[in-house]
Image (cartoon, grey):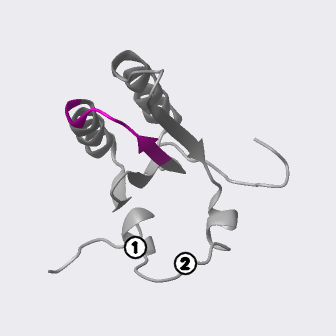
Amino acid sequence: MPSYCPAVIKRGEGLLTWLIFDITSNRVRRLLIKQAFKLGFYRVQKSVFLGKVEKSDADTMKVYSEEIIDKNTDSVYIFPVCEEDFKKARFVGQAFNKELVCDELRSLVI
């Protein structure tokens, strides 16, 4: 991990990871969304997910994506961000619940 982004990963805590995709097939998009939820990602926009996931889960998502997408028309981006840098992020408009994504919110009452 780069020295400018000091993130301490403890067992079971994971690292904040963005998952962003542009998929042409509705079927493939639904499969990716289902897998994202299964691995612990939260939806923040239609094709944008964020989760505090283990590296192995991010790797699983990469492998799964490679198996089902059309590499000529689709794209999937998976990249981690340390919490220090994430706290510096600025959101405009309908932002998502940062505490929920970061697993800081223990329960959400709707």
Q: Amino acid at mark 1?
A: Phe
Residue sitting at x 37%, y 16%: 67
Q: Secondary structure at mark 1?
A: loop
Asked whether the residues under the numbered discs 1 and 2 touch, taking CB atoms below 8 Å apart as contact, a structural biologist would say yes
- The residue lying toward the viewer, choosing from 11 and 17, is 17
Residue sitting at x 43%, y 77%: 95
- Residue 102 placed where, x, y %? 45, 64
**Which residues fall within the magenta stretch?**
19-27
Instruction: Count neighbours of disc 1 (C-alpha within 10 A) and say few if under 14, some if 14 to 19, many if 20 or more.
Output: some
Is there any visible trace of residue 77 in the rendered image? yes
- The residue lying toward the viewer, choosing from 102 and 93, is 93
Q: Image quadrant for the N terminus?
A: top right
Q: Residue furthest top?
A: 67
On the image, numbered disc 1 is attached to which residue? Answer: 96
Q: Residue furthest right?
A: 3
Instruction: Count neighbours of disc 2 (C-alpha within 10 A) and say few if under 14, some if 14 to 19, many if 20 or more.
Output: few
On the image, numbered disc 2 is attached to which residue? Answer: 91
Residue sitting at x 47%, y 47%: 20
Horizontal placement of 3 versus 100: left or right? right
Q: Image quadrant for the C terminus?
A: bottom left
Horizontal placement of 62 versus 86: left or right? left
Q: Amino acid at mark 2?
A: Phe
Q: Is residue 79 magenta?
A: no
Tell me which label, 1 or 2, sits earlier in the chain.
Answer: 2
Q: CA distance from mark 1 to mark 2?
A: 9 Å
